[in-house]
């Protein structure tokens, strides 16, 4: 909006789901407890230079041992939903037989949540592939998708009676292209079109598991995608327009089209088919991938300006296959990740999904920002920038709802400061500050504010907050 008027109070629809999110490897620690086997992130984080500061998830937020206190803190804040992920290497160590001890942790977590009136939203895969499966080829081979279905069934058998919402995969774009093309995430492979093979097997894993979970009576099943808004840096440049199209095809439509339309985008096939990756696509796969879903999870942090003129100074491996491009900044404010703050992009993204892929309910399953928070002398953590980021993005969600988009909920990333993948512990996304020396948790001012929004369903909260 171009209005300069003070932002006004906005009411969200009744029944809108408010939550916070985390992921297993980012918070749990206890990497060998109760028979957990290594995951690709245990391995990758120990490769010198892979993670800032040499950080690993060995301890993280020690959530595996502090889970009851963490749930109690969540309940104190009064947020109604919690989106967490299950660690495959705990539940089926070495991708072998189910582990009662590993399942026990999630069983207790779900009971603890329900006991505090918090609804569990379970993600099966947030990037911690059992290392043995990577040793056998990882997501570049089809067998991994079959193993994922076995794992999904194991988790559903244990928790299906109590968990209402099931997400198969978190952000398969990251697993495929950051993991197998750019090599900046586990397993750290820089193999060009391997990312496309991986994407197909991830999609297959999603579709086959979604079908299985629904057949077993799961109330709601979906997938979470990290989608972007790709704008040409210069709309008058054909090269920039084409580069933005390529980014849109690989980041967004490569996943949206097979799941919601049963086909791969024709322009993406024209750009990349010569690389041979479609050899892994078998008859019937797209039918499996396009199994009905009940909800599409949308993770949004920022959009991208895309230029077809690559920056020669930038020698980092690109996650985009067959696309020489750069992503110049636009002078927007930036977070500690250097990501631009672009709330209107979220409105456009949700409206685009509403227009191009109608009929599937949307939930923002992640949105949030890293800032350099510091603990004040009085022990409090004041984070006005994060509060403003959340406020602006919630306004953007509200605008999409007013525009007709069927948005049913919002999850702030993240409940706790945690292991920010290749950035280690240096980047803090939490509503709750974590002191990694003492494991003391301190709700930031944004947490108190967000709790008020969740309780009342409107922005900004007119009540004085505790
Ligand atoms: C999410 O991923 C994750 O689900 C979550 O675990 C993580 O902690 C959180 O966000 C914060 O990072 O053009 O190569 O520079 C974030 C997805 C995808 C956002 C890549 C930034 C820039 C990639 N990210 N994107 S690049």
Image (cartoon, rainbow, N blue to C red):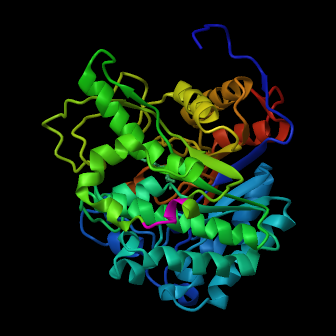
Residue visible at 62% across and 34% down in the picture: 390
Residue visible at 30% across and 15% down in the picture: 236
Q: Residue furthest top?
A: 4
- Residue 326, position as x, y percentages in the image: 25, 35
Quarter the C terminus occupies: top right
- Residue 387, position as x, y percentages in the image: 62, 34
Which range is magenta? 282-286
- Residue 430, position as x, y percentages in the image: 57, 49
Q: Residue furthest front?
A: 283
Quarter the N terminus occupies: top right
Q: Nearer the viewer, residue 8 or 226?
A: 226
177, above or below 363, in the image: below
| 96 displayed left or right of 113 | left
Q: Quadrant of residue 343?
A: top right
Magenta span contains residue 252: no
| 464 displayed left or right of 236 | right
Q: Residue 125: tell me if it is visible.
A: no
Magenta span contains residue 283: yes
Q: Residue 104: tell me if it is visible.
A: yes
Residue visible at 30% across and 30% down in the picture: 242
Q: Main secondary structure of the magenta part?
A: loop
| 370 displayed left or right of 365 | left
Q: Nearer the viewer, residue 147 or 437?
A: 147
Q: Nearer the viewer, residue 269 or 370?
A: 269
385, above or below 157, in the image: above
Q: Residue furthest left?
A: 312
- Residue 449, position as x, y percentages in the image: 71, 37
Residue visible at 81% across and 35% down in the picture: 457
């Amino acid at each position: 909006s171009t209005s300069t008027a003070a932002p006004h109070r906005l009411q969200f629809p009744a029944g809108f789901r408010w939550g916070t999110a985390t992921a297993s490897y980012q918070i749990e620690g206890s990497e060998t407890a109760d028979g957990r086997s290594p995951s690709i992130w245990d391995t990758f984080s120990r490769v010198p230079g892979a993670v800032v500061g040499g950080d690993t998830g060995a301890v993280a937020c020690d959530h595996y041992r502090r889970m009851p206190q963490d749930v109690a803190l969540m309940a104190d804040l009064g947020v109604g939903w919690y989106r967490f992920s299950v660690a495959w290497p705990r539940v089926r160590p070495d991708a072998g037989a189910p582990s009662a001890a590993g399942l026990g942790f999630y069983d207790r977590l779900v009971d603890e949540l329900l006991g505090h009136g918090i609804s569990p939203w379970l993600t099966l895969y947030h990037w911690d592939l059992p290392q043995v499966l990577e040793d056998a080829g990882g997501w570049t081979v089809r067998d991994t998708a079959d193993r994922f279905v076995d794992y999904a069934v194991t988790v559903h058998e244990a928790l299906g009676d109590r968990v209402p919402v099931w997400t198969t995969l978190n952000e398969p774009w990251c697993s495929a292209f950051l993991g197998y093309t750019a090599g900046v995430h586990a397993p750290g492979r820089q193999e060009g079109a391997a990312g496309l093979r991986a994407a197909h097997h991830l999609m297959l894993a999603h579709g086959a598991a979604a079908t299985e979970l629904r057949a077993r009576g799961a109330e709601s099943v979906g997938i979470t995608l990290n989608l972007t808004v790709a704008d040409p840096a210069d709309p008058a440049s054909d090269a920039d327009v084409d580069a933005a199209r390529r980014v849109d095809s690989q980041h967004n439509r490569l996943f949206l089209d097979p799941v919601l339309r049963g086909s791969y985008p024709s322009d993406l096939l024209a750009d990349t088919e010569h690389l041979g990756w479609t050899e892994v696509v078998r008859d019937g796969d797209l039918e499996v991938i396009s199994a009905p879903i009940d909800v599409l999870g949308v993770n949004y942090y920022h959009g991208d300006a895309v230029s077809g003129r690559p920056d020669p100074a930038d020698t980092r491996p690109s996650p985009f296959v067959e696309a020489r491009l750069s992503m110049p900044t636009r002078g927007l404010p930036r977070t500690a990740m250097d990501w631009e703050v672009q709330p209107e992009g979220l409105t456009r993204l949700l409206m685009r999904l509403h227009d191009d892929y109608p009929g599937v309910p949307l939930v923002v399953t992640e949105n949030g920002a890293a800032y350099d928070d510091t603990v004040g002398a009085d022990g409090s953590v004041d984070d006005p920038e994060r509060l403003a980021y959340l406020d602006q993005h919630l306004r953007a969600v509200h605008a999409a709802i007013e525009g007709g988009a069927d948005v049913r909920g919002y999850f702030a990333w993240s409940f706790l400061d945690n292991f920010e993948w290749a950035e280690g512990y240096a980047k803090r996304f939490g509503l709750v500050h974590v002191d990694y020396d003492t494991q003391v948790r301190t709700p930031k001012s944004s947490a108190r504010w967000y709790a008020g929004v969740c309780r009342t369903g409107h922005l900004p909260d007119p009540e004085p907050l505790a």
